[in-house]
Image (cartoon, rainbow, N blue to C red):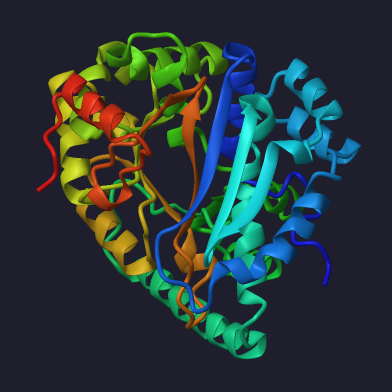
Amino acid sequence: MPAVIHSLLETDLYKFTMWQTMLHRHPQAQAEYRFVCRNAPAFPLADLLPEINAELDALCGLSFQPDELAYLAGLRFMKSDFIDFLRIFRFQRDFISASVEGQVLQIVARGPQVHVMGFEIYVLAIVNELYFRRFDAAAALAEGRRRLASKIAQLRGLGDEVPRRHPFEVFDFGVRRRFSAAWQREVVATLKRELPQYFKGTSNVLLARDLDLVPIGTMAHEYLQSYQATGVRLRDHQKAALEDWVQEYRGDLGVALTDVVGMEAFLADFDLYFAKLFDGLRHDSGDPYQWGEKALAHYARLRIDAHTKRLVFSDGLDVPTSLALYRHFADRTQLGFGIGTNFSNDMGLVPLNIVMKLSHVNGQPVAKLSDSPGKTLCDDQTFLAYLRQVFKIAEPR
């Protein structure tokens, strides 16, 4: 079988935007990322270990090609020195290991953050594709195409409704949990062809280039988490991360992620200065309606016209949920909907719920205090308790 990853462009845009910022702001940071499977697979992922190690070997043999660097350089927010860094970059095999403990697959990337932070999406895509290769591909693809056609029909139905103030815009966020690279390409190409009025881009940089789409993405949890251990006061880590982002991108990539320590704590730091400078906010945990209402109320308190801002929803979305949220908020603010697994791995099979998350920076634990308790991530309960205390966040019941 061909290698799962054949181009280093085949990752989420926000890996590049965070990578550039960390290279410029914290090039000396050391980090550790760990693979976690949150649900029960049909067979132990440990069975995939030999294939995973072979794929990691192949990944570490790749480099950015001249045409790929030219594409990235054409994005106005990419700096020339970062492109020069990518020109000589290669993943180092010594910085990542895959092993087995019992029946549990362990994958750990550890080293300079600017050398290991890029592993995440490739690792998740590799594990997914190797896993789903063991199922009946013909049956899965037939069911996937049937379901995709149904989604397209549902979205077309929006045209029969009374127009709302702001348009419906949906993006593909499906690299990390896709059925396969070929299937994601088929899905994105089909959505572009069939729904040009609604489908506005993909987080997959390779597909954005190849299919002439807008690459979508700004920041992920790891970016803000990193600032919990880069020398600033813990209470100020969100403000420090947002300020560095503003200075790095000067008005580009203006959607901020809100749930690293929860929406309430985020809004306490998201003052008039940041609320004016950032174009909008991204939801990734907790009740999306409550989150959206809190965001709009915050803009109202700051006397900012919410029609000039955007709320992006990206937490486990499907088409019906996206349409319901659109109907609820579309007359009050601009919206965007990032659909991941439900676009790239809705095949009649149970998707893997896998992540590869930042666990330590500079030898210190970091954490995500999600608005969904099941998404809270931290290996160190003492640090987690301290983080709750600093941000006055109660233990979930």
Please provide percent x and percent y for residue 390: 20, 19
Left or right of residue 61: residue 117: left
In the drawing, does residue 209 fall left or right of residue 38?
right
Q: Position of residue 362 (x, y in %)?
A: 52, 19
Task: Identify the residue shown where x is 49% and y is 51%.
Answer: 355
- How many numbered dots are placed on residues in this image? 0
Residue 325 or residue 122, whichever sits in front: 122
Locate residue 17 relative to residue 228 in the image: left or right.
Answer: right
Could you tell me residue 281's position as x and y percent?
34, 34
Kindly tell me whether residue 103 is visible in this rendering: yes
On screen, residue 98 above or below 182: above
If the image is split into quadrants, where does the N terminus sit? Answer: bottom right
User: Looking at the picture, does residue 138 appear above or below residue 48?
Assistant: below
Residue ID at (33%, 29%): 308
Quadrant housing residue 75: top right
Question: Quick check: 21 above or below 295?
Answer: above
**Residue 149 placement (x, y as % from top left):** 51, 80
Q: Residue at x 26, y 56 (%)?
A: 325
Would you identify the image quadrant in which residue 312 lies?
top left
- For the question of whether residue 254 can be seen, the reply is no
Q: Residue furthest right?
A: 66
Please identify the residue farthest to the front as the structure is shown.
Answer: 102
- Residue placed most toward the observer, 20 or 249: 20
Q: Pick whichever, 349 or 104, lies toward us.
A: 104
Question: What residue do we see at 67% from left, 46% from top?
Answer: 97
